[in-house]
Image: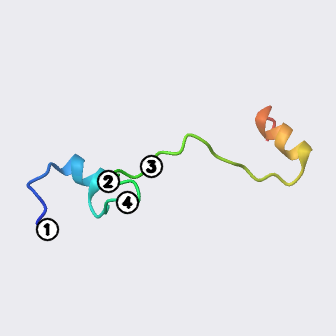
Amino acid sequence: MATPNLHFETLQLHAGQQPDPTTGSRAVPIYQTTSYVFKNAEHGANLFALKE
């Protein structure tokens, strides 16, 4: 299928993305979560307290 004449900004978000076969969604999902790895509990506490 030919790519329509899309603006540069639109292509930055959607170029190369194929529809999901299960949901039909064309957009890349946005995950509003994350995880972090810490050396230990003290290291994590120091980072969140901005001590490191």
Task: Tell me the CA gap for discs 2 and 1.
Answer: 14 Å
Q: Earlier in the sequence, mark 4 or mark 3?
A: 4
**Quadrant in which the N terminus appears:** bottom left
CA distance separating discs 1 and 4: 16 Å
Quarter of the image with the C terminus is: top right
Residue that carries the numbered disc 2 in the rendered image: 26
Of callouts 2 and 4, the N-terminal one: 4
40 left or right of 13 in image:
right
Which amino acid type is marked by label 2? Arg
Q: Which is nearer the eye, 41 or 33? A: 33
Q: Name the mark on residue 1.
A: 1
Q: Is residue 22 above or below residue 13?
A: below
Q: Which residue is mark 4?
A: 20
Residues under numbered marks 4 and 3 in contact, where contact means CB atoms less than 8 Å apart: no
**Relative to the observer, which residue lies in front, 3 or 52?**
3
Residue contact between numbered discs 3 and 2, judged by CB atoms under 8 Å: no
- Are there few (<14), some (14-19), or many (20+) residues within 10 Å of tag 3? few
Q: Amino acid at mark 4?
A: Asp
| Element type at mark 4 | loop
Pointers 2 and 4 in contact (CB under 8 A)? yes
Residue at point 37% right, 60% down?
20
Q: Position of residue 30 (x, y in %)?
A: 47, 45
Using the numbered discs, state the Cα–Cα distance from disc 3 to disc 1 in whole angstroms.
23 Å
- Left or right placement of residue 5 versus residue 45 in this view: left
The residue located at (83%, 43%) in the rendering is 44
Q: Quadrant of residue 32?
A: top right
Residue 29 is labelled as 3
Question: Which of the two discs, 1 and 4, labels the residue nearer the N terminus?
Answer: 1
The residue carrying pointer 2 sits among few (fewer than 14), some (14 to 19) or many (20 or more) residues within 10 Å by Cα, namely few
The numbered mark, 3 or 1, whose residue comes first in the sequence reads: 1
